[in-house]
């Protein structure tokens, strides 16, 4: 028994490492260009410089991910490449959790590998360090625990209730909106299984354990905010500031996405959720007449927990947010298709059908894994051969286009020259962090200059700050003939252009004082 357990753990570990390495092979060859990667790294880098979240750093989410990233930057190296390794580990955790959930539902390992591999390929453009990914990983681990215990008595004294609470609390500390919904689900979920007064009392005990677990990480973050005197700033940015986020990407836009798979999935997603709800009701009625196990409860559990991640799509329903938000729903779809396949399989009158199924699933899984492994080796070989940056700080061992290198050098040289004359330079642009990172500068509000990220007073608050600026402060804004990021606070940019003194140009920016 002990040997079998060690063998199973070893297999799981090898699979996790394989997934993480394959994910890294995809991320590693990407040049510096992904603003989500830059923003997340820059926030963690600011923490390594002893700046305090919310007080010194503009953040609209709870602080767990940048704090974890900052720890690794401190321990290993303060480079974007380290955050890419961490992203690979996080995505490894997500895909491995998907595999483990599928094994609980489907059992047959090769089929689970095939589905996990297909989802991994579907997510290929999402691979980046991001708080949504950490939130998703916590949600998947909770779902795994719930499904693993679903065949046990619903209200037996189970230590996993406290663990589930801790994981939900960590999600609240990663992204408050996802975490809040997940916490509500975690606390309220089991009430659907209550059938009598005794079970209701046991349910209350479960609720108590889960709430205690949820509160522990939240209390620790609250203590940190009090200790650093940043609670008011947290409320300003992460609570009230979110209301100033006015830009949206509607869900309907996904249906005209460039990728056919996104068009199809976005169209059928509402129907998948509806199918899960209808199937649960149908199976619950069938359960009264014959023994079908807990299939209905499994589908219902996935349906309920999918609601915790669907909020990721609001208010930006782009491809990446859609895929991350729909992960649990995709697992539900895979399970429904599996049940449909089993129903068809059972009607086939062929003695060798089991053997044919096993051989077919084995061959497909081998082909898929071989394809992924070959692509991974090709990517790693390409990464080794790439001409990577070795001069610009924090971007070492990553490819940077010649044009971007020239821009960074020109803009950074300008900033450093101004600083020699005791002048302070701010870049009011979504790309500001790209230029501030190499010279170890951080400017609150400006290094992630987006609507919703600049505090509760929004654009008017930033205009008032500019009105009161010192004479030695210089502001750069993107040239009017160049396209700005869609989330740029244009009212602030227009105020600078119309009211400050134009001094000239540097690279892609106009200079004002």
Image (cartoon, rainbow, N blue to C red):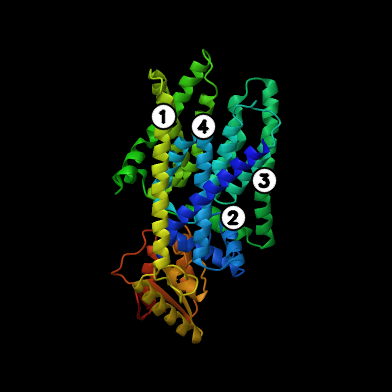
Local secondary structure at mark 3: helix
Mark with earlier residue (2, 4) = 2
Q: Residues within 10 Å of mark 4 (few under 14, many from 20)?
A: few
Question: Between disc 2 and disc 1, whose residue precedes?
Answer: 2
Front position among marks 4 and 1? 1
Distance from the alpha carbon under mark 2 to that under mark 1 = 45 Å
Mark 3 closeness class: few <14, some 14–19, many ≥20 residues within 10 Å: some
Q: Quadrant of the N terminus?
A: top right
Residue 142 in the image: above or below residue 37: above
For marks 2 and 3 on the same chain, the one whose residue lies earlier in the sequence: 2
Cα distance between the residues tagged 2 and 4: 34 Å
Q: Give the side of residue 344 with respect to residue 300, left or right.
A: left
Q: Nearer the viewer, mark 3 or mark 4?
A: 4
Badge 2: residue crowd in 10 Å (few <14, some 14–19, many ≥20): some
The Cα atoms of the two marked residues, 2 and 3, are separated by: 15 Å
**Residue tagged by mark 1?**
357
Residue where numbered disc 3 is placed? 215
Q: Position of residue 363 (x, y in %)?
A: 40, 38
Please, what secondary structure does the residue beneath circle 4 have? Answer: loop
| Dot 1: element | helix
- Whether pointer 2 and pointer 1 mark residues with C-beta atoms closer than 8 Å, the reply is no
Residue 306 x/y as whole percent? 49, 38
Work out whether mark 3 precedes mark 1 in sequence or the reverse, and give the earlier one.
3
User: Where is mark 4, residue-wise?
Assistant: 107
Marks 4 & 1, CB-CB < 8 Å contact: no
Determine the CA span between mark 4 and mark 1.
14 Å
Query: Mark 2 = which residue?
Result: 64
Q: Can residue 132 be seen from the camera position used here?
A: no
Foreground of the two, 472 or 297? 297
Q: Which mark is residue 102?
A: none
Select label 2 or label 1 by which is in front.
1
The reply to whether residue 280 is visible in this rendering is yes
């Amino acid at each position: 028994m002990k040997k079998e357990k060690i063998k199973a753990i070893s297999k799981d570990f090898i699979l996790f490492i394989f997934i993480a390495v394959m994910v890294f092979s995809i991320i590693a060859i990407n040049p510096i260009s992904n603003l989500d990667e830059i923003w997340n790294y820059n926030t963690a880098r600011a923490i390594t410089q002893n700046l305090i979240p919310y007080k010194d750093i503009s953040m609209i989410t709870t602080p767990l991910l940048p704090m974890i990233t900052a720890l690794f930057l401190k321990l290993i190296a303060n480079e974007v490449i380290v955050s890419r390794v961490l992203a690979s580990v996080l995505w490894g955790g997500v895909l491995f959790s998907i595999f483990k959930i599928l094994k609980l539902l489907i059992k047959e390992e090769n089929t689970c590998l095939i589905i996990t591999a297909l989802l991994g390929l579907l997510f290929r453009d999402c691979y980046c360090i991001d708080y949504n990914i950490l939130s998703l990983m916590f949600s998947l681990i909770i779902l795994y625990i719930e499904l693993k215990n679903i065949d046990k008595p619903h209200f037996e004294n189970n230590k996993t209730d406290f663990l589930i609470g801790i994981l939900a609390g960590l999600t609240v500390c990663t992204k408050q909106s996802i975490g809040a919904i997940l916490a509500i689900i975690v606390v309220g979920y089991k009430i659907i299984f209550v059938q009598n007064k005794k079970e209701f009392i046991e349910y209350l005990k479960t609720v108590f354990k889960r709430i205690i677990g949820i509160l522990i990480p939240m209390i620790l973050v609250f203590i940190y905010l009090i200790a650093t005197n940043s609670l008011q700033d947290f409320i300003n940015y992460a609570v009230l500031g979110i209301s100033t986020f006015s830009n949206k990407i509607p869900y309907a836009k996904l249906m005209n996405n460039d990728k056919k798979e996104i068009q199809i999935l976005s169209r059928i997603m509402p129907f998948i959720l509806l199918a899960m709800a209808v199937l649960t009701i149908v199976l619950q009625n069938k359960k009264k007449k014959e023994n079908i196990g807990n299939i209905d409860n499994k589908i219902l559990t996935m349906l309920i927990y999918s609601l915790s991640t669907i909020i990721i799509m609001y208010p930006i329903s782009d491809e990446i947010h859609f895929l991350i938000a729909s992960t649990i729903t995709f697992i539900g779809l895979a399970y429904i298709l599996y049940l449909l396949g089993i129903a068809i399989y059972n009607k086939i009158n062929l003695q060798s059908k089991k053997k044919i199924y096993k051989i077919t699933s084995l061959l497909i899984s081998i082909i898929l894994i071989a394809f992924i492994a070959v692509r991974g080796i090709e990517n790693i070989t390409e990464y080794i051969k790439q001409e990577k940056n070795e001069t610009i700080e924090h971007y070492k061992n990553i490819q940077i286009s010649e044009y971007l290198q020239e821009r960074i050098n020109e803009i950074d040289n300008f900033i450093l020259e101004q600083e020699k004359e005791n002048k302070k330079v701010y870049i009011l642009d979504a790309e500001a962090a790209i230029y501030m990172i190499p010279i170890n500068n951080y400017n609150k509000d400006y290094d992630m200059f987006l609507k919703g990220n600049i505090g509760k007073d929004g654009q008017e608050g930033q205009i008032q700050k500019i009105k009161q600026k010192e004479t030695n402060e210089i502001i750069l804004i993107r040239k009017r003939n160049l396209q700005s990021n869609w989330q740029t606070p244009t009212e602030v940019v227009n105020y600078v252009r119309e009211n400050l003194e134009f001094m000239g140009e540097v690279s892609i920016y106009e200079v004002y004082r």
